[in-house]
Amino acid sequence: MSEHNPVEGLVQVRAAIRRAAADGGRDPASITLVAVSKTFPAQDIAPVLAAGHRVFGENYVQEAKAKWPGLREGHPDVELHLIGPLQSNKARDAVELFDVIHTLDRPSLAEALAKEIARAGRAPRLLVQVNTGEEPQKGGVAPADVDAFLEACRDRYGLAVEGLMCIPPAEDPPSPHFALLNTIAARHGLETLSMGMSADFEAAIQLGATHVRVGSAIFGARPRKA
Ligand SMILES: *Cc1c(COP(=O)(O)O)cnc(C)c1O
């Protein structure tokens, strides 16, 4: 285990969420902390579970499949969120493993998820990822295409979309992106807004985030990918 203490990180992040909620006149209970445990081994996650936290986010289907069935054994009330890009050929595993998928962003994936949901008789909650910065290398639906995509999800694929998610460009101030996501969601009456990470979750809460995805502020720095 690393020297960093994830339970201390958790306590600090929870306190910061309460302060940001109070500043914005919001009920802290309306904000869900998704503890992003990608790349961290089960032994780093176990203390956070033992401290009572139940909502976790992972980026990779294979990694989550290896780690979570064991971790979930003593904690059947864990809620697992997929926050990384999803390949259509992993839709079956994703539907079996995750309770919420934040990264629905194209018709082929909507089709694959609809098929696996029907087959499994189990439906994860779904968020559409919006590429608010229109970055070519990033997943997500372009802001101009969100209306048509939501309509296709509903009418063509029979999927109930609960909300929207975004990852602002690293080099931009995040608040205009959070505000844009909020505006698009309001236009569609969508209540879930997944936005804000370690560096900017307070700003996201000011702009209406219902889910903040926080990794390094809880678990410490992730080893850099080789
Ligand atoms: C890794 C990741 C996070 C957490 O990032 P931190 O900066 O460590 O809080 C949040 N959202 C997504 C989509 C991620 O990939």
Image (tube, helix red, strand yellow):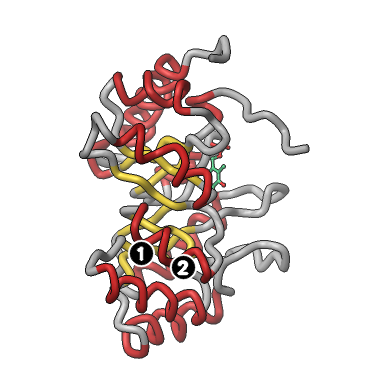
Position of residue 210 measured from the top left corner of the image (x, y, whole percent): 34, 49
Position of residue 192 measured from the top left corner of the image (x, y, whole percent): 33, 58
Position of residue 181 measured from the top left corner of the image (x, y, whole percent): 47, 62
Q: Which quarter of the frame holds ligand 1?
A: top right
At horizontal 45% and vertical 21% (from top left) the residue drawn is 43
The residue where tag 2 is placed is 104
At horizontal 40% and vertical 72% (from top left) the residue drawn is 113
Residue at the farthest top position: 3
**Callout 1 crowding tier (Cα within 10 Å): few <14, some 14–19, many ≥20:** many
Q: Amino acid at mark 2?
A: Leu
**Callout 2 crowding tier (Cα within 10 Å): few <14, some 14–19, many ≥20:** many
At horizontal 54% and vertical 53% (from top left) the residue drawn is 84
Position of residue 106 measured from the top left corner of the image (x, y, whole percent): 52, 76
Task: Evaluate if marks 2 and 1 touch, with contact meaning CB atoms under 8 Å apart.
Answer: yes
State left or right for residue 74 relative to residue 143.
left
User: What label does residue 126 carry, if any?
Assistant: 1
